[in-house]
Image (cartoon, rainbow, N blue to C red):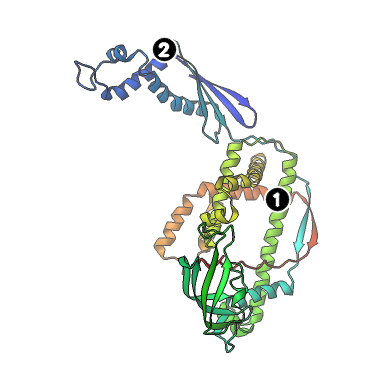
């Protein structure tokens, strides 16, 4: 057989494979041997009937369909190897000719790994925003750590105020009847945090410890539990205890309690360095993306949608994994946003396309510049990965398993190193102008949400 390659638009090709009558006949003989044990012909033991007799009883083309099923993947694999294409999706298959005594023609239309026509990647002008870390930025991080170390202590006050933490029992009723999930005991509520359904926390203000009261609310129309959405409810609430949040003093003892440092100033210096390192990383990432976008503007490439969609699905899975680490399930997120997985995957497609283009650019630069990665460099990167776990965190067996895992990823690690070298070459050959950017500090961390039915 000989495969003919025809290039189509958008990194798509068509492979045409012709086979002669002898090859088709050979496949039909193979189909006969595969199926003969299932066929019964009077006068012959099951599985022993001659092929000609079976064809006489069931028609001359009885094995033709099975022969095609045998040939399709086999010929495709041979055609891919012969033409050296790199498919990125499953092919669309068509049988254009099929006749015993003549042969057959098969066509495979498939998306392939795109070829990028690399534009100029040297002497590119780009600005690099330099973020100055201020004392305020450092203090904001310290305050966050102080907040996380706060303790709740029983308050001497007896009346609930905005911002208090109170311990309550509650029982919810709809149309005078208790409902599933509408009751809790010793529930801690931060009054004013907005974690409960609208109107619930506000009505706690002014109640006294030991006092019981009725709180009337209405569940939001878009409430995640459909059987409660839009329903009016009444909660019988008892305030059992009032607590206040007490922050630790920002002093040397605080530094010792939350870190390995002996003094608060040492902790401040450590925080500043971390902020500066993170700011530098983000600044460089942003600059590198600008450079890659400039290269993309003067390069040419057609990326098949199947490749973009597959990358978007990967980004969607990563996104859901990050949400799960924050305690938000996929189902919960989809309910809150009112989107489907398909909607979200589609939303990720522009980002996926950009990622693919950037990877293609780096690969093209690597190839053009003859960038190589040695085994020693891969070994060093694996050692770097392993050192991140610390000497005391893994027992010898676990460390060895981890080492075996990373050794199994050597090809992927080498690819990452090669792309890093290509990016460094682009940066080293760029005209970079440093400009100051306003310091923004760190974004406040989001707090977790409660799950009970009285809450959002």
Q: Residue at x 39, y 18 (%)?
A: 64
Q: State the residue position of label 2.
A: 100
Q: Nearer the viewer, mark 1 or mark 2?
A: 2
Residue 144 is situated, as x and y percent measured from the top left of the image, at 63, 74
Q: Please report whichever mark, 1 or 2, sits nearer to the chain's N-terminal start.
A: 2
Q: Farthest residue to the bottom: give it.
A: 156
Viewer-proximal residue among 153 and 229: 229
Q: State the residue position of label 1.
A: 289
Q: Secondary structure at mark 2?
A: loop
Q: Name which quarter of the figure residue 13 lies in.
A: top right
Residue 322 is situated, as x and y percent measured from the top left of the image, at 55, 58
Q: Name which quarter of the figure residue 110 lies in.
A: top right
Q: Residue at x 56, y 73 (%)?
A: 215
Compared to 33, does 290 lie above or below? below
Viewer-proximal residue among 264 and 429: 264
Q: Secondary structure at mark 1?
A: helix
Instruction: Give the side of residue 429 with respect to residue 160, left or right.
Output: right
CA neighbours of label 2 inside 10 A, class few (<14), some (14 to 19), many (20+): some
The Cα–Cα distance between marks 1 and 2, rounded to whole angstroms, is 58 Å
Q: Farthest residue to the top: give it.
A: 101
* Res 283 visible: yes
């Amino acid at each position: 057989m000989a495969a003919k390659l025809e290039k189509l638009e958008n990194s798509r090709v068509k492979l045409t494979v012709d086979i002669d009558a002898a090859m088709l006949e050979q496949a039909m003989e193979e189909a006969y041997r595969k199926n003969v044990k299932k066929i019964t012909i009077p006068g012959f033991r099951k599985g022993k009937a001659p092929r000609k007799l079976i064809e006489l009883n069931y028609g001359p083309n009885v094995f033709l369909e099975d022969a095609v099923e045998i040939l399709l993947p086999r010929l495709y694999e041979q055609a891919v190897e012969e033409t050296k294409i790199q498919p990125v999706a499953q092919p669309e298959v068509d049988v254009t000719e099929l006749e015993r005594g003549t042969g057959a023609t098969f066509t495979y239309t498939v998306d392939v790994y795109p070829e990028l026509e690399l534009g100029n990647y040297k002497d590119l002008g780009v600005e690099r925003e330099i973020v100055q870390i201020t004392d305020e930025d450092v203090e904001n991080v310290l305050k966050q750590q102080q907040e996380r170390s706060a303790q709740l202590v029983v308050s001497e006050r007896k009346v609930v105020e905005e911002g208090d933490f109170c311990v309550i029992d509650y029982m919810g009723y709809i149309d005078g009847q208790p409902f599933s999930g509408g009751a809790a005991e010793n529930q801690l509520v931060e009054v004013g945090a907005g974690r409960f359904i609208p109107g619930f926390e506000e009505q706690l203000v002014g109640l006294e410890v030991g006092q019981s009261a009725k709180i009337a609310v209405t569940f939001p129309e878009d409430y995640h539990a459909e059987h409660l959405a839009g329903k009016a409810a009444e909660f019988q609430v008892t305030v059992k205890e009032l607590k206040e949040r007490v922050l630790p003093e920002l002093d040397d003892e605080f530094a010792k309690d939350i870190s390995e440092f002996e003094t608060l100033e040492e902790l401040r210096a450590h925080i500043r360095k971390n902020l500066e390192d993170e700011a530098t990383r983000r600044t460089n990432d942003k600059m590198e993306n600008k450079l890659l976008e400039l290269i993309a503007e003067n390069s040419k490439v057609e990326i098949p949608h199947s490749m973009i969609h597959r990358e978007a699905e990967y980004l969607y899975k990563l996104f859901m994994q990050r949400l799960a680490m924050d305690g938000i399930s996929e189902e919960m997120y989809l309910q809150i946003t009112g989107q489907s997985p398909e909607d979200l995957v589609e939303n990720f497609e522009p980002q996926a396309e950009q990622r693919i283009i950037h990877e293609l650019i780096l690969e093209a630069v690597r190839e053009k510049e003859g960038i190589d990665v040695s085994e020693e460099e891969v070994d060093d990167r694996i050692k770097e990965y392993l050192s991140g776990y610390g000497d005391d965190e893994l027992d010898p067996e676990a460390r060895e398993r981890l080492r075996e895992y990373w050794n199994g990823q050597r090809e992927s690690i080498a690819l990452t190193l090669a792309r890093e070298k290509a990016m460094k070459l682009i940066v080293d050959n760029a005209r970079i102008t440093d400009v100051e950017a306003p310091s923004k500090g760190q974004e406040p961390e989001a707090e977790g949400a409660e799950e009970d039915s009285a809450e959002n």
